[in-house]
Amino acid sequence: MTSMAEDQKNGTGGSQTLLRGLDVIEACADGPIQLAALADKLGLTRSTTHRLANALIDRRYLASVPRRGYTLGPELLKLGFLAQRQTDVVQTARPHLEELAKLSGDTVHLGVLDHDRALYLDKIAGQRRIDIRSRIGDRHPLTSTGLGKALLIDDKPLRWLALFEQDQAAGAFPIERDLWLERMKTYAASGHAFDLEENEDAIRCVAAPVRDSSGRIVAAISVSSAAQYMDDERIQALVVDVRQTAEAIARDLGWSDR
């Protein structure tokens, strides 16, 4: 292990100090940590760790809490908010959606929650000669679309049922309440959802939620096709690709499964 003085003498001080500073910030991410524990975690001397931490405190990237240790500082909160605001989910998702459309050969959608409807923000047509009537800007019932169900899987059953009754009263595809609820519980447990010809006649789809850095569902994606190309076996096979794509978009939005 080299000291900061040795790094500077070797001409690597700037980059080494920067990387060590980032290591200090990441080491504080799980909560308050005392100086001794922080130094041990980083493999640095206490004096080097103390100097790095103090420099970060001066710039408000860290804070020092008496008797508890170092925590993340307010500057990181500000930067995180700015980064999140600058991230456009449509722009972030687009290359992943294009790859999924190419891989599946079917129509791919991206949508978000808009009050009590699923708002479609992007659509990439598939390679098959199938007319799927959805358009960018359309708002569809949450409880009868795969994309809408994927947006709801973190919610409580009481909210599911309230939306279900509302959609049924508005003319959504008729389905027995207990059967629908049982399916929703399965979707919530598995992390993906299906549309089994509930929103558009003879059209089926596989959908999965997209999460942001906080783990909150902020969007959902789906692959849709004619029922003749979407038998039960193919729907199950597509689950892996759809979920992997949703997770890739989520990682670009700052989500981590660690």
Image: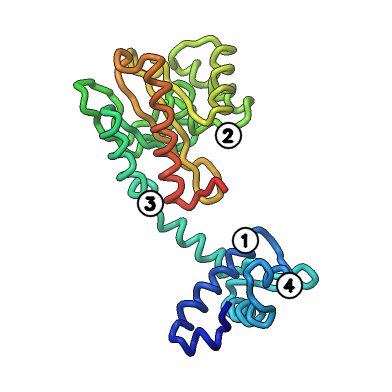
Q: CA distance from mark 2 to mark 1?
A: 25 Å
* Amino acid found under the numbered disc labelled 3: Asp
Q: Residue furthest front?
A: 1
How crowded pointer 4 is (Cα within 10 Å; few <14, some 14-19, many 20+) is rated as: some
Residue 195 x/y as whole percent: 42, 20
Residue hosting label 4: 36
Residue 235 x/y as whole percent: 40, 21
How crowded pointer 2 is (Cα within 10 Å; few <14, some 14-19, many 20+) is rated as: some
The label on residue 88 is 3
If you read the primary sequence from the N terminus, does the residue marked by circle 3 or circle 1 appear first? 1
Q: Nearer the viewer, mark 3 or mark 4?
A: 4
If you read the primary sequence from the N terminus, does the residue marked by circle 4 or circle 1 appear first? 1
Q: Are marks 3 and 2 in contact (CB under 8 Å)?
A: no
Q: Residue furthest left?
A: 129
Is residue 30 among what the camera can see? yes
Q: Nearer the viewer, residue 72 or 167?
A: 72
If you read the primary sequence from the N terminus, does the residue marked by circle 2 or circle 1 appear first? 1
